[in-house]
Image (cartoon, rainbow, N blue to C red):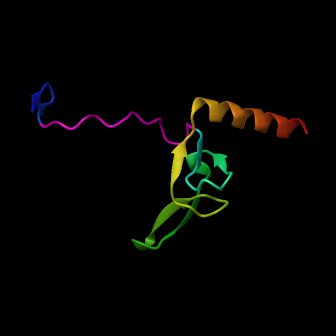
Amino acid sequence: MIGPGGFMAAPKAAERPAYNTAPIRCGRLKCKWRGYEGEMTSVPSKKFGPGVTDKVCPDCGTHGYYHMTQGEIAAWERRKRAGDTA
């Protein structure tokens, strides 16, 4: 198909927030860790060798993560405030 982007142009990737600015959660459903990308732990990569590091969850070691929804962010902030006052 020919469209405004040219012949068979791929759709633009979804806009992502800048690094370490958006709250994320661990990619493993049973893990309760929440935080920012900068808080993830660096470990030597098993796939690419010792000179390369992977960012993994500090609690369970899972490589993947998800950006939180607005509802998840609100609940996370409430829990943080409740933990600060307790």
Magenta highlight on residue 27:
no
Looking at the image, residue 86 sits to the left or right of residue 53; the answer is right
Say above or below: 27 vs 67: below
Question: Which quarter of the image is occupied by the C terminus?
Answer: top right
The image position of residue 41, as x and y in percent, is 60, 60
**Residue 82 screen position, x and y as percent:** 84, 35
Instruction: Please give the name of the residue rendered at 16% of the width and 36% of the height, measured from the top-left corner.
Output: 9
Say left or right for 34 vs 84. left
Q: Is residue 47 above or below residue 15?
A: below
Instruction: Locate residue 45 relative to residue 69 in the image: left or right.
Output: left
On whether residue 20 falls in the magenta region, the answer is yes
Q: For the view shown, which residue lies furthest in the top direction?
A: 4
Which of the pair 43/78 is nearer the observer?
78
Image point 64% across, 63% down: which residue? Answer: 60
Query: Residue at point 49% right, 62% down?
Result: 54
- As drawn, 39 above or below 76: below
Image location of residue 17, percent across then percent down:
47, 35
Please determine whether, in this image, residue 5 is positioned above or below residue 83.
above
The chief SS type of the magenta part is loop
**Viewer-proximal residue among 31 and 34:** 31
Is 66 positioned to the left or the right of 74 in the image? left
**Quarter of the image containing the N terminus?**
top left
What range is drawn magenta here?
8-22
Q: Where, by quadrant of the figure, is residue 24 drawn?
A: top right
Q: Position of residue 8 (x, y in %)?
A: 13, 37
Residue depicted at 47% across the width and 37% down the height: 18
Q: Hey, which quadrant is residue 21 in on the image?
A: top right
* 47 vs 29, nearest the viewer: 29
